[in-house]
Amino acid sequence: MSLVEAAAWSLHVGFAVFWTGSVLFVAVAVVPPATRGDIGADALAHIVGRLRWSTRIAALAFLGSGGYMMETRYTVDALFATDRGHLVLAMVALWFVTTGLVEAASGTLADGLDAGTLREPARDARPFFYAAAGLSVGLVLTAGLLAAPFGS
Ligand code: HEM
């Protein structure tokens, strides 16, 4: 494995852990108290802002490192005709939809906070955060299958 490959893999796995962990943490630990009004508006705005930016920076990291990994390990045929190729395509699709859900959820919450409300936007954003958390678990499972000596 070359130095560039090692860097791409480390960046990719590092952001995978950080980003899916962040999405799950916000869904599990931040959204429920926010819907009850048990968390300050400023703190919530800060957390959601950080999640939004993390999602955008992670998108660049995933596209850059994942694109490189795809180019070095797969041909177009291998992507569509092998089990591992299907897992990579599933990974890209899950990442894309999860990113959209996090953007929609954070946008809904941020707009509500800007308008001076808290509980209602938190309730509106809750299904998006929960769906994003569910898909994050799917991403971790997909990555786990790729890490195991599975398929061809
Ligand atoms: C643009 C989005 C993405 C692309 C293009 C992409 C692409 C890839 C590719 C090509 C591989 C190498 C597969 C192999 O070893 O055969 C890989 C591995 C991996 N990906 Fe992604 N990925 C993306 C997003 C994600 C996300 C959001 C996660 C979060 C869980 C993730 C987690 C991982 C992990 C942990 C591995 C290492 C698996 C191993 O040990 O081989 N990826 N990815």
Image (cartoon, grey):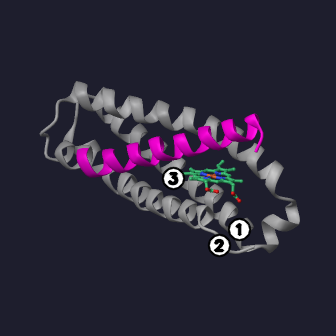
Number of numbered markers: 3
Looking at the rendered structure, the kind of residue marked 3 is Thr
Confirm if mark 3 falls within 8 A of ligand 1: yes
Look at the image and say whether residue 84 sits in the magenta stretch. Answer: no
Q: Residue at x 56, y 60 (%)?
A: 143
Please state the horizontal and vertical placement of residue 71, each as a whole percent of the image.
82, 49
Instruction: Give the residue drawn at x 56%, y 32%.
Output: 57
Task: Name the one closer to the observer, 97 or 149.
Answer: 149
Residue found at the far front of this picture: 1
Q: Which of marks 3 and 1 is nearer the N terminus?
A: 1
Residue type beneath disc 1 = Arg
Q: What stretch is highlighted in magenta?
A: 1-29
Q: In this view, does 86 lie above or below 37?
A: below
Of callouts 1 and 2, which one flags the residue occurring earlier in the amino acid sequence? 1
Mark 1 crowd level (few <14, some 14–19, many ≥20, 10 Å Cα): many
Q: Which residue in the structure is indicated by mark 3? A: 98
- State the CA–CA distance, disc 3 to disc 1: 21 Å
The percent position of residue 68, horizontal first and vertical second, equals 77, 43
Q: Name the residue under label 1.
A: 84
Q: Is the magenta stretch mostly helix, strand or loop?
A: helix
Q: Does the beta carbon of the residue at mark 1 sit less than 8 Å from ligand 1? A: yes
Residue 67: quarter of image:
top right
Residue displayed at 58% across by 67% down: 145
